[in-house]
Amino acid sequence: MIDLHTHTLFSDGELIPYELVRRAAVAGYRALAITDHGDFSNMDLIIPRLVRVAEDLGAAWGLSVIPGIELTHIPPAAIAEAACEARSLGARLVVCHGETIVEPVVAGTNRAAIEARVDILSHPGLISAEDAALAAEIGVCLEITTRKGHSLTNGLVASRALAAGAKLVVNNDAHGPGDLVSLEMARRIALGAGLTEAQFEQCRKNSEALVRKALG
């Protein structure tokens, strides 16, 4: 299992990075990206600390650890700048908090994140066919999420992505130990969103490609 969207005490998660990674390792995960919620007020505090420990932490517990960020509730006009700043601070994976229907994310966030060429647009809610097509053209991955609430629109996200040829990944958006689902549960959630077995396997390959890019 690979999870490219997780949170620690650096934002609204329950665990410090070392415990999160240890629990993921025991659960059989092969790679984990730590992507705490970030904006211009805290990225310089979060990202360098993750960069400092990621390689040693991964070596200690036997999996790949990727320092990242989830740009969250940033005005659309500022998302490109935020993504650039995150990468300059050392983020190897940039996720953007998409237009989930369970939070008041401003309209236009999905499009701005795709245009900013983030790596993953998380839980993009009622994503339009046009935005899914742009994600396919640019190469931004769209997320199928195992997290309650955000997962309510998985079916639409899957159908729009597949119709447009956009890449999909399956992530947990883990905030605590109980969110680190098994590979089998991730598979079932993906199938429940309308994916076939082959399409779920492609999601896994997409995640693996992001890991290789981040660690390259």
Image (cartoon, rainbow, N blue to C red):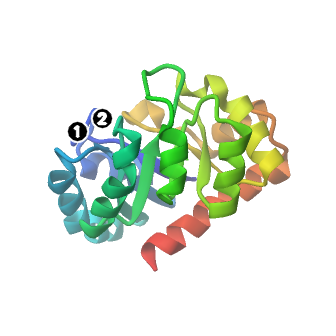
Marks 1,2: beta carbons within 8 A: yes
| Residue at (67% x, 31% y) in the render | 154
Q: Nearer the viewer, residue 174 or 193?
A: 193
- Residue 7, by quadrant, is top left
x and y percent of residue 118 in the render? 48, 57
* Left or right: 122 in relation to 194: left
- Does any portion of residue 23 appear in the rendered image? no
Q: Secondary structure at mark 1?
A: loop
Is 5 drawn above or below residue 75 in the view shown? below
Amino acid type, residue under disc 2 in the picture: Gly
Residue 126 location (% of width, % of height): 64, 29
Residue 15 pos. (x, y %): 26, 39
Q: Mark 2 — residue?
A: 13
Residue 215: quadrant of the picture: bottom left
Residue 9's tag is 1
Q: Secondary structure at mark 2?
A: loop
* Numbered circle sitting on residue 82: none
